[in-house]
Image (spheres, rainbow, N blue to C red):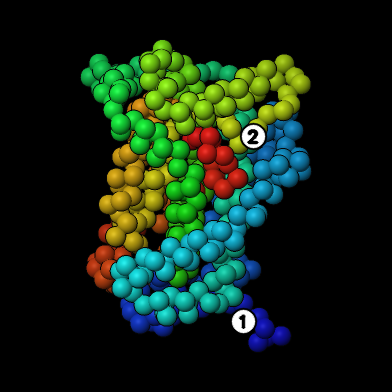
Amino acid sequence: MSRLLRLFRPVPEATEARVAGGPADEDDAEAPAGGGKLWIFYPFEVYTAVVLAIAVLFLRYHRLRIDWRTVEYTLYPMVPLLPRALLGGIGLQVLYRLVTRRSLRDYLRRIASVPWMVLWLRMWVAAMLMTYMYFWVKISVPLINERLWDRQLWSLDVLLHFGLSPSIFVSQAFQGSPILGLLDRWYGLWVTTVFYTMAFFSAMPGELVRRRFMASCVFLWTLGAWLYMAVPALGPIYAFPQVWHDLMDQMPRARSAQIGLWENYQRIVAGRTGGLKEFNPTLGVAAMPSLHVGAHWLFALWGRRRARLLFVPFVIGTLLTLIASILTGWHYAVDGYAGLLLAWLCYRLGAATERGKPTTAPQGEGGGKSSRESAAPLELMAGSEQSRG
């Protein structure tokens, strides 16, 4: 029995790094005592459980029916996507190592263990629970907090940009441009980019870095959902549709998604008087903050820390997402700025959830200097590409 229990005990990250033939950085360092036992709950799991319990109690307090059928409708459809996340993540890690000329044998040896697989599964369980909570908090916003902040956000946009509305400026600047269709397509790929980026980072060999990464994702999506509840806003495309009157035909993907979300939103609003039915909980409408921008920036920050080759592409992707979020009318510019700030905060929180022993980072992985250079989240799997954050 003791031999069987040892099989399920993770190898400390610092030991794994030595096996891989290189020094560990802080993300691969050994966690504090007690973190190597599988029956111990990691910080990202504790936080997920706490915010999920708070969300369920909050929604039930407001007399919203959060029962087992909500689990069946939003959680169960995510389960078949787990093999895709596993194979896609490992495949992307293999590709990254081929490009950067890193050892494939060491990587495959490190992931070919029961502890690695168990932690991977625990991470994705947390991701599914955070997505479940995100969907139901977001879709419930119009039922709990009826006030809308669109006019204030529009005014703040104008104030921050010296009297010029970014929505008007961007829409006029790109009108008739072929870039319009490209940005429309890019924004529509957000769910796919988030899913496979999370798969990539969750398939890294080190345990500590994976736990920290998942903690930052849980922070981002859960805090984002509660900000939706605190500062409800529809977004400029719904509050000021006249700005995009001559533009939306050039962005068919955004237009189709916006029609679908608006119809679903109207059903939710009609449910304020009772009789809410036939709605899609994955199609919530909310603007502040933009988690589209926030998620891509969070990945850029983790790329800078753990996959330097991807940092510049992630930065470019974040910039394109910010521009597209304004151009399509989904968000005010200030929503994107709030998303950037929230992502940075969640990155710092995630990196601080567990402390390892700081050592020198290996060249090519953490960047050739100590990982302490950094001073140390769906609308995801089950969500439609029409969903937005």
Q: Which mark is residue 323?
A: none
Q: CA distance from mark 1 to mark 2?
A: 41 Å
Residue at image point 26% right, 71% down: 363
Amino acid at dot 2: Pro
Task: Identify whether 223 is placed above or below 209.
Answer: above
Quarter of the image holding residue 328? top left
**Residue at x-position 36% and y-position 27%:** 327
Find disc 1 in the rendering and name its residue.
7
**Residue type beneath disc 1:** Leu
Labelled disc at residue 281: 2
User: Horizontal and vertical percent for residue 100?
Assistant: 30, 69
* Quadrant of res 58: top right
Q: Would you place residue 77 above or below residue 352 in this image?
A: above
Which element type, helix, strand or loop, lies under badge 1?
helix
| The quarter of the displayed image where residue 333 is located | top left
Q: Quadrant of the N terminus?
A: bottom right
Q: Earlier in the sequence, mark 1 or mark 2?
A: 1
Above/below status of 222 relative to 353: above
Label 1 CA crowd tier, 10 Å (few <14, some 14–19, many 20+): few
Residue 351 visible in the shown view: yes
- Disc 2: CA contacts within 10 A as few (<14), some (14-19) or many (>=20): many
Q: Residue 89: x percent and y percent? A: 48, 62
Q: Indicate whether 39 appears above or below 280.
A: below
Where is residue 94? Give x, y as percent. Answer: 42, 69
Q: Nearer the viewer, residue 116 or 347?
A: 116
In the depicted view, which residue is nearer to us: 234 or 321?
321
